[in-house]
Image: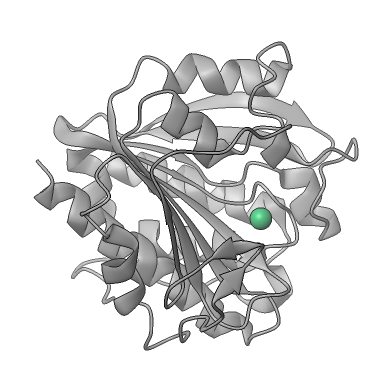
Amino acid sequence: MRPEKNEMMWRPMRLCEAHDAGKYEARWLRVARAARMEVRELGTGEGGRVLCLEGRGAGGPGLYLSSGVHGDEAAAAAGLLLWAEARIDYLRRQAVTVVPVFNPAGLRMNTRLDGEGRDLNRMFHLREDPLMGSWWRVVEGRRYGAAVCLHEDYDAEGCYCYELNEDAGLRLADRLLGSVEEWVPRDGRRTIDGRRADRGVIQRRRVPALPGLPEAVALYRAGVPVTLTFETPSEMEFERRVRAHAAFVEAAAGEIENLK
Ligand SMILES: [Zn+2]
């Protein structure tokens, strides 16, 4: 991806500041101001505020983006920020919801779990939880065309994508992975995380019953027609992982405009 002209904020997050939740917040607030996005607070804790940014643009269908649900997956959060800073115009005109750092305490501590030792990505069914409750209040009234959840995986051998899609023929993940390969090659394993995979794509129309609900599954069950969980290999060079996440979001944002 290339930064748009007149874009002054184009500067990738450096590895040394990749777990500084305050830096993310400051830069996302600048994005919100520049893109005229509405900022609300989903929750707050010792790690900082969990912000949710919403574009006021009418362009749709809407796109949902999140990262940092797991705090030890910093390239996902840094990649989403990198993309947003280069795509102010897109954020200004489209209906977009962004939760840029879902787990600031985990990000600070470099842990998968949050400050209370919980895996947030198994908690999206818990509407009585204050953080999950305020998240549901935001997303429930929206009509999203797609949702993108950015993650990283220590076991991965390349990038891969878990696609939940009502339209099995769309094969969105395969195209999107094609646009990140210049940064991170695909995970070639035939089985990923216990599921059948084909060139880095795990595609499902129906979801199995799960004990704790991940974000992407919650959104799919709530009516978002396609959800994409993108994963990069945690052990690969940081900069390449960051670029891969930014490139994935860039390609997904382009696809969602074409879905209109
Ligand atoms: Zn994760």
Vertical side of 107 occupied by 222: above or below: above
The residue that appears at 38% across and 56% down in the rendered structure is: 84
* Quadrant location, the N terminus: bottom left
Whether residue 178 is visible to the viewer of this picture, yes or no, is: yes
From the viewer's perspective, tell me whether residue 175 is left or right of residue 109.
left
Q: Quadrant of ligand 1?
A: bottom right
The residue that appears at 66% across and 62% down in the rendered structure is: 194
Residue 244 x %, y %: 45, 75
Residue 80 x %, y %: 46, 59
Residue placed most toward the observer, 175 or 236: 175
The residue that appears at 46% across and 63% down in the rendered structure is: 161
Residue 146 x %, y %: 31, 42
Q: Quadrant of residue 249?
A: bottom left
From the viewer's perspective, tell me whether residue 121 is left or right of residue 259.
right
From the viewer's perspective, tell me whether residue 39 is left or right of residue 33.
right
The residue that appears at 63% across and 65% down in the rendered structure is: 152
Residue placed most toward the observer, 119 or 203: 203
Rendered image coloring scheme:
one colour
Vertical side of 225 occupied by 20: above or below: below
Residue 162 x %, y %: 48, 57
Furthest-top residue in view? 128
How many marks on residues?
A: 0
Vertical side of 172 occupied by 143: above or below: above
Whether residue 81 is visible to the viewer of this picture, yes or no, is: no
* Quadrant location, the C terminus: top left
From the viewer's perspective, tell me whether residue 122 is left or right of residue 8.
right
Residue placed most toward the observer, 175 or 79: 175
Furthest-right residue in view? 117
Q: Quadrant of residue 235?
A: bottom right
